[in-house]
Image: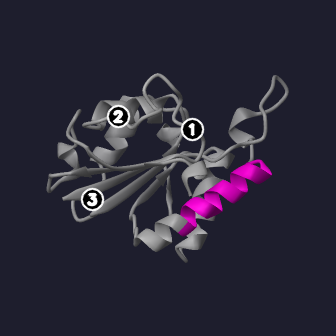
Amino acid sequence: MKRLLLLRHAKAVPGGDDVDDEARMLAPRGQDDAAAMGRYLRKSGAAPRPVLVSPAARTLETASLVLRELDRTDDFEIVEALYLATPGTILAAIQAAPKKAEEVMVVGHNPGLESLFLILSDKKPAGIAGEKFPTCALAVLDFAIDDWRDVAPGAGMLARFLRPSDL
């Protein structure tokens, strides 16, 4: 059994024409939400390794705040291809995870993260179909597989879907 955690970055400062999108940091609410999600993961016993993170400032900050709560600050792998990635690119990164890894986390962006979740999950939680995967939302999917290469559409058993407001 393998467990996949898909975490959208927390709420970032607004973008704009004169703002480098990749450099956008978290807003204060986003910082609070990421820390709260980290506390939830600690209490639930989560121990994802590897943690694959987009190189954007907001995903790096989200990952750092979450992992700080797990006493693993900056214990993540930056994957350049995850920046605003398509579902196929995110899936390829997951499928490349080491076979021995039991729990993998991806910290990324919409719309790719939401699309991948909808592709992989065996069911959709209330409030997600037709709506965005909210900032700092966490989807936890279990797969009855022995190797990450075998992750396939519809094979992910939805264990949890949490929004910061659920915590």
Q: Which is nearer the eye, 128 or 91?
A: 128
Q: Decide: is 29 above or below 49.
A: above
Q: CA distance from mark 3 to mark 2?
A: 28 Å
Camera-near label (3 vs 2) is: 2
The residue under label 1 is 134
Where's residue 49, x and y in %? Answer: 38, 65
The amino acid type found where label 2 is placed reads: Lys
Q: What residue span does the magenta drawing correspond to?
A: 26-39
Q: Decide: is 159 above or below 102.
A: above
Q: Which is nearer the eye, 129 or 61?
A: 129
The amino acid type found where label 3 is placed reads: Pro
Point out which mark residue 124 bears: 2
Task: Identify the element where label 1 is drawn.
Answer: loop
Res. 124 image quadrant: top left
The residue under label 3 is 98
- Magenta span main SS: helix
Q: CA distance from mark 2 to mark 1?
A: 14 Å
Q: Is residue 129 left or right of residue 136?
A: left
Q: Is residue 96 left or right of residue 126?
A: left
Where's residue 15, x and y in %? Answer: 77, 31
In the image, residue 128 lies in the stretch drawn in magenta: no
Q: Decide: is 31 above or below 24.
A: below
Residue at left 63%, top 44%? 56
Where's residue 33, x and y in %? Answer: 65, 55
Camera-near label (2 vs 1) is: 2
